Image (tube, grey):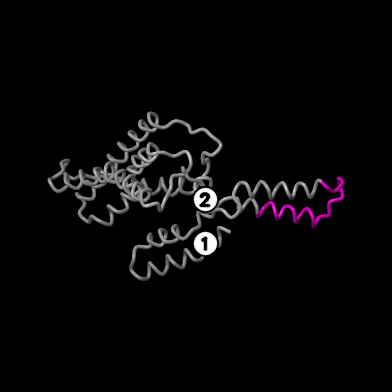
Amino acid sequence: MKLAYVLPALVAWAGIYAAGIHPTIAGVIVGLLTPVRAWLGSEGFRVGVQKELKHLSERPEGTHASHELASALRHVGVARREAQSPAESLIVTLHPWVAYGIMPIFALANAGVTLSGGQLDSASWHVLVAVALGLFIGKPLGVLIASWISLRLGIATLPAGLTSRHLAVVGIVAGVGFTMALFVAQLAFTDAKLLAAAKLGVLAASGGAGVVGLLLGRVLLVEATGSDVARTADDAESSTSA
């Protein structure tokens, strides 16, 4: 149950906050501890539902006892819940709140750029360029290099249907570091001019990465075909390109 993660998350948040550490670290910890593998998966869900339907269909119409129907519905409910991993289920549940509530509020509250005097000094330009290059070039390179090392060492494999072209596009899209980059910039800079320059760098790099990622996706990526190609996150977790 998703609610099982709420109390531990609140305890972790309160403890980290009381220790003087930024409480967002609690979110990172809880995210890393949330299982990404489903107990049943899509196949288990299909088998479970078919089993309950078969059991009910074997009895004549109108002879189903209320407790039998309730039991069947309960089993189907469990199968539905366990068809997705806890991480994926939380993503689906929280997505509307994040996409239509939290993200817009965060963007409106943090993306404003105010430049007194209308010009950037030398230090501000250095910050702007460094932040923009870090997002637009550094993050894609980091994704590609980390993926290449993991694949070469054998500690990771590509899901079925994925190639280096997909990794390249994912790396570029990682440059759209809008929310966390603004958040880190607020922690890093207390000077108003430097913070404004960092925000400009974030906005410029995120916009550029979004456009380049869209163009590269159109050019490099084609829809994968084949029965072994991963279609969902759970399929990707359980499949390899080997």
- Residues 40 and 139: in front is 40
- Say whether disc 2 or disc 1 marks the residue closer to the N-terminus: 1
Position of the N terminus, as image quadrant, is: bottom right
Q: In x, y percent, where is residue 59?
A: 85, 48
In the rendered structure, which amino acid carries the disc numbered 1? Tyr
| Pointers 2 and 1 in contact (C-beta within 8 Å) | no
Q: In this view, does 206 lie to the left or right of 99?
A: left
Q: Name the residue under label 1.
A: 5
Q: In x, y percent, where is residue 158?
A: 43, 45
Q: Mark 2 points at which residue?
A: 88
- Residues 11 and 143: in front is 143
Q: Which numbered tag is attached to residue 80?
A: none
Q: Is residue 24 left or right of residue 5?
A: left
Q: In x, y percent, where is residue 146?
A: 33, 49
Magenta run includes residue 63? yes
Magenta run includes residue 60? yes
Provide the residue span drawn in magenta.
58-78
Q: In x, y percent, where is residue 185?
A: 27, 52
